[in-house]
Image (cartoon, grey):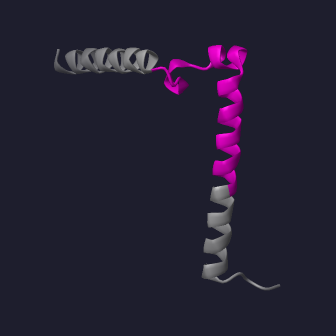
């Protein structure tokens, strides 16, 4: 049994990461073109700037309530 060299493992890891990224990009394109699928995505995955702003506002509000609880 031959053990892979560190260079071979690094190359394989890089190739696997690139393959995974390509698959993700293609899946995302498919979702962006599918209206029903796009509607089912949570706001955190939306590309609509208004949805992203609403999510950021919600996170900021939650963060504020956590700080109030911690100080009280």
Q: Going 54% across and 26% down the picture, which residue do you hit?
A: 45
Compared with residue 4, is residue 17 higher up or lower down, i.e. above or below?
Answer: above
Reply yes or no: does residue 32 show up in magenta. yes
Q: Residue at x 71, y 81 (%)?
A: 4
Residue 15, how many percent across, how many down? 67, 64
| Residue, far left | 71
Report the residue at 30% width, 20% height from top.
60
Residue extending farthest to the front is: 33
Residue at the outermost right position: 1
11 lies above or below 5: above
Using residue 62 as the reference point, say whether residue 50 is left or right of it. Answer: right
Position of residue 60 in the picture relative to residue 21 (left or right): left
The percent coordinates of residue 40 (x first, y second) are: 65, 15
- Residue at 50% x, 24% y: name it: 44
Characterize the magenta stretch by its predominant secondary structure: helix
* Residue 13: quadrant of the picture: bottom right
Question: Height in image: 68 above or below 29?
Answer: above
Does 36 appear above or below 22?
A: above
Residue stretch rendered in magenta on the structure: 19-48
Location of residue 16 in the rendering, given as x and y in whole percent from the top left corner: 68, 60
Q: Position of residue 34 (x, y in %)?
A: 72, 21
């Amino acid at each position: 049994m031959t053990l892979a060299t560190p260079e071979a493992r690094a190359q394989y890891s890089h190739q696997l990461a690139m393959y995974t990224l390509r698959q993700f990009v293609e899946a995302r394109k498919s979702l962006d073109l599918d209206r029903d699928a796009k509607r089912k995505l949570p706001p955190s995955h939306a590309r609509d700037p208004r949805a992203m702003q609403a999510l950021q506002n919600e996170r900021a509000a939650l963060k504020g309530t956590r700080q109030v609880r911690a100080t009280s």
